[in-house]
Structures are given as structure tokens and as C-alpha cells.
Image (cartoon, helix red, strand yellow):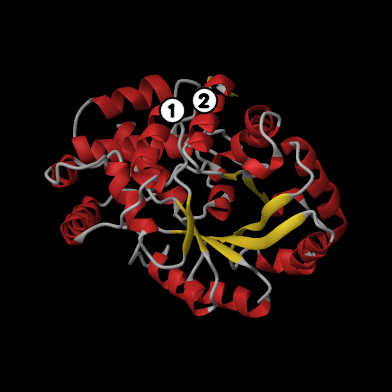
Amino acid sequence: MRLPMIGEDVDLEQTKKMVDAFLDAGFNYFDTAHGYIQGKSETALKACLTSRYPRDRYILTDKLTGNFFQKEEDIRPFFESQLEACGVDYFDFYLMHAQGAGNFDHYKECRAYETAFELKKEGKIRHVGISFHDKAEVLEQILTEYPEVEVVQIQFNYVDYEDLVVQSRRCYEVCRKHNKPVIVMEPVKGGNLVNLPEEAEKVLEDLHGGSAASYALRFAAGFPGMMMVLSGMSTLGQMEDNISFMKDFKPLDEKEMEAVHKVQEIFHKQNLIPCTGCRYCTDGCPKHILIPDLFAVMNTKQIHHDWNADYYYDAVHTTQGRKASDCIKCGKCEKACPQHLPIRKLLADVAKEFEK
């Protein structure tokens, strides 16, 4: 969902270079969903990957998102449209998308899991899994009710490890208990663990080693049972950096882990909005407010305390009248938020800060 962009369109030439570099380095796992980049992620994969390489060169994951089907009969046509959009005959992994207490019943009522298992028998899916955003007890319920699930994708990073909402550690432990391989999403928390507060940045720089991203990805990848870490690379430079430390992977050593724990503590003191920039909230917003961008500006103000954030709020993110104060408090954003953020209250805080 974080491909390089030129305006509203995917930068296909840079994406092709990223795909080539990734495959040349021996990596092969690609993840998409129909809703990513307003439907452009799947077609970009076709243009940059599946039309250019033989099928055995890559592993491709797609997802069944709840708002694209209303009843059981909708699922197969939607699935076939995804195969066509991606230019493939089968998916290696097909995930029930963003599972949690809020949408699990919808998937059950529409027999979504059962349909996916049937598609697996037909050879159109190799492995059925879930991506998950909720408390550990909900994950326990899903894996108990559907033991056939083969893999679980969870949000896992060093800031969310003990977070009471995300519950990275506890969800990971449920996966281990049920013997499910884990796919990690948000290992750099939507870029938050790269754009660090100055104090945290210095802690990692004093190690005289890799980039801030390298410590975040290596933290996540170092746990037993981690099948894949999705870093959401959006430039060729990020791709080259990630390849440099993941090609010959080494878990964090004791000194590096100690530094990461210090960064954890600094983050927890900052009182930042834990938005990952997934943009699920913006799709249904009737006022078209760029919610993640406004939260990012708010965090920048908290970290740097300078005028720059005010400039970006006024001159970049709200030029078309999409101010935080324009929120009508309909709550659609909060239902879509994987982080379960109180978005309406947070937008009021943003308005108070920037619209004095």
C-alpha cells in the first residue's frame, strides 16, 4: 500500500526497478489488497511483476476485504476479479483482511472462510490465512473456530510490543500457541520508527551501525516463527537499504536490543498519536479530511516544537478546506481504524492546536 507515487498514480518505472532489485537479491514475497491505493496496487503488481516474470519467481498474497462483499455470492466474483487485476491464475496466500470483533461475524455469516477453503481445494489459493487487528482474545477465538487457518499477519514492532491496544506480544503468543507462522505488518509503524524524535535518533546513531529502519525490522524478524516481515518500501533507496541488512540477516545483539528499549521509553514519553498511515479512515470520510496527514503534522509539532508543522497544516494538507474542524463526527473513520483510535477526539485536538 506504500508504493512510490507520482501525484495520484503509482510510479511504475521506479516500482519496476524496486521489483527487479528485490528479486535479484533473492527475495520473492509480495503483498497487496484490492483497496490499497484506491485499487491501483493490484494493477501495479501486474504491470511491474506478474507480466514481467514467470509465476514461479514470486509469492503473491492478496486479501478479502469486508466492504467488498455483502453476501456469500459476492465473494467468488470478487476473487476472480482480483486474479484478473493481478494477472495470475492463483494466489499463494489469501487472507481474510483486517479481522477483529467488529467484522468477524460478517465473514462468518457470508461463509467467507469456507469459500476460501473451497477455493484452496480448487487450486486457486495455496494457503488461507488472516490479517488481524484486535485484542489477543479475539485472535484466540478465530483460530479456535477456524483451525484450518494456516498463517496469521499481525502488527508487530518494538513500540507496540506491550501496547494495551495493539497487543503485539500477546497476539504473537496466541499465534505461537496455535503453531501458526507469523507475517509481520507495520514493523516500522508506518514510518514512525524511522522519523524518530531527536533523542531517540541519537540513541540508535550511537550504535554506529545501520539505519533506524534496520533496527526495527531486525527486531521483528528476530523472533521465532516469523515467516515474513513486510516493510512497506516506497522508494528504491528504502529497498536497497532493507536488502543490505536482510540479505544476511542477523537478529539484534544485546547492545542493540538495549538501545531499542531506550527508544521504546522515549517514544512512550512523547504522547504521540499512534497512527500508521494506512489511510483506511480516509476512504469513507464524507468531508475528505486527510486524517493521517493531520495526525503526522500533530506528531511533528510534538517532536520538534517548531513552525514547520503549522506551515504544512495550512499550506499543504488543508488547502482544499479539509481542516480538522470540518469533521462532522459521523464516526465512519473510527470503525475503519485498525489501531482503534478515537479519531473524532484527536481531530478536535488537532483543530485546537493548529486553528487557534
Rendered-image quadrant of the N terminus: top right
- Residue at image location 64% in from the left, 34% down from the top: 38
Residue name at image x 50 percent, y 36 percent: 22
Q: Is residue 88 above or below residue 262?
A: above
Q: Are marks 2 and 1 in contact (CB under 8 Å)?
A: yes
CA neighbours of label 1 inside 10 A, class few (<14), some (14 to 19), many (20+): some
Residue under label 2, please give it. Answer: 17
The part of the image, by quadrant, that contains residue 98 is bottom right
- Label annotation for residue 81: none
Query: Circle 1 is placed at which residue position?
Result: 236
The three-letter code of the residue at mark 1 reads: Leu
- Side of 263 relative to 41 (left or right): left
Amino acid type of the residue that numbered disc 2 sits on in the rendered structure: Lys
Of residues 279 and 34, the one nearer the viewer is 34
Q: Does residue 283 sit above or below 176 in this rendering?
A: above
Along the polypeptide, which appears first: circle 2 or circle 1? 2
